[in-house]
Amino acid sequence: MITDTPAAKLLLVDDLRENLVALQALVRGDGREVFCAHSGEEALSLLLEHEFALAILDVQMPGMNGFELAELMRGTERTRRIPIVFVSAAGREMNYAFRGYETGAVDFLHKPLDPQTVRSKANVFVDLFRQRQALEHAQEELQRAVRMRDDFMGLVSHELRNPLNTLYLQVQVRKRLLASGKLPEPPALVQMAERDERQVRSMIRLLDDMLDVTRLRTGRLGMEPAPMDLAQMLHSLVEAMGEQAKAASTPLELDAPPHLALTADEFRIEQVVTNLLTNALRYGGGGPVRVSLATEGAHAVVSVKDQGPGIAPQDQERIFGQFERAEATSAVPGLGLGLFISRQIAQAHGGSLTVRSEPGAGAEFLLRLPLDAPA
Ligand SMILES: Nc1ncnc2c1ncn2[C@@H]1O[C@H](COP(=O)(O)OP(=O)(O)O)[C@@H](O)[C@H]1O
Ligand SMILES: [Mg+2]
């Protein structure tokens, strides 16, 4: 049984204190909480307060008797499914005295009580309660998964729509130009092609991220570590991103030695740094972005630092989760997968990906990779 499940609550109702004490001793157990009521009225107030796995009701009580209490329980949504065991001194023909309690399980115990029977009946109903709890839990999980899928489809559609719309508009413009016989000059054509390329790239990146998440979940995001030069990779990556940085009018600078050799999956590490740089350009508020490479003990440390609004303390860990994004940046579209994938890649290399940020003073992401390949 799961240890942190809440206690199964049992309700005992009897007007005689000594009966309650005796019953309580019989049904007590680990993971159970026993409540006693001396009258139907007292039982009702407990029923409103707690969710019971089982109610054991004395039939003969002054005032509201056990059957009347059961009748009231049946008529109330909150209590109608609680199984009831009646305790009666009368003969077994009393079994038929209470009719119509179709919904809840009903059972009878006869006085004098046989301890073994009382215990096993209580066990059966507590087990049933536990099973129902487990079922409800599974159902909630399922509903959550369905909700997540729906949210996800909405997000993806939205993310794909923007670049597709832009492409569509550009195609329209070109069709008109062609129809009017006014063909643009080659430099303008090159520019158009570059814009198209950016839109297509962003869609490919989005789909790649989604594929990576699926691969991570199914354990198929294999790493292929090989000797590589991390410094050189950074030099060419920063140069390649120069165009994008200029488009965002963000100064981008690199502080790295000419060479740093280690063993890693170059393609995947490039993916991580690209993610960090793209984020710095998107969320860094246009201020300068600085990439640096240094060694720290047995690790190479890549830092990507911006001077944007930074990340609130309560978001600093959360943003590494699947689909998690900071509230402050919700105006910028994104799926919230980049950091999740990047951290998994860093960890698969025996390294780490962390963030340091003081809100208002920018964010610094640190990728640590072991200089000696992990065994
Ligand atoms: N440099 C940064 N400055 C501020 N916030 C950032 C930065 N990088 C990432 N974030 C926050 O982390 C979130 C998750 O980033 P990421 O996993 O790359 O997904 P996405 O970029 O698709 O939102 C972003 O939505 C943003 O809120
Ligand atoms: Mg991102």
Image (cartoon, helix red, strand yellow):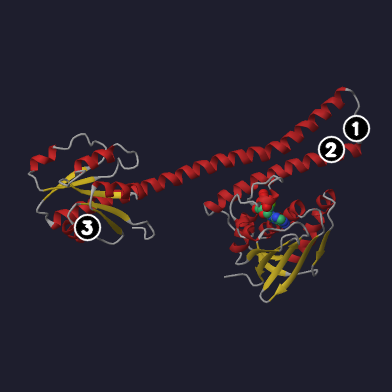
Q: Is residue 4 depicted above or below 261 in this figure? A: above
Q: Earlier in the sequence, mark 1 or mark 3?
A: 3
Amino acid type of the residue that numbered disc 1 sits on in the rendered structure: Pro
Q: Which of 226 and 235 is in front in this view?
A: 235
SS at mark 2 in the image: helix
Res 27 label: 3
In the picture as drawn, the residue positioned furthest to the bottom comes out as 297
Q: Residues within 10 Å of mark 3 (few under 14, many from 20)?
A: some
Which residue is painted at 78% across and 60% down in the image?
307
Q: Label 2, on which residue?
A: 192
Give the image location of residue 234, x and y in percent.
Answer: 76, 62
Q: Distance between the residues labelled 2 and 1?
A: 10 Å
**Disc 1, SS:** loop
Percent position of residue 330, x then y: 68, 47
* Residue 219 horizontal side relative to residue 355, left or right: left
Q: Which of marks 1 and 3 is in front?
A: 3
- Local packing at callout 1 (Cα closer than 10 Å; few below 14, some 14-19, many 20+) is few
Q: Residue 209's spot in the image, x, y percent? A: 63, 48
Vertical arrangement, residue 126 with respect to residue 29, above or below: above
Q: How far apart are marks 1 and 3 (CA)?
A: 88 Å
Q: Which of 332 and 294 is in front in this view?
A: 332
> Could you say which disc has been placed on residue 184 in the image?
1
Which mark sits nearer the N-terminus, 2 or 3? 3
Amino acid on which the number 2 mark rests in the picture: Met
Closer-to-camera residue (337/274): 337
Placement of the C terminus among the 4 image quadrants: bottom right
Report helix, strand or loop for mark 3.
Answer: helix
What residue is at 72 percent from the left and 73 percent from the top? Answer: 295
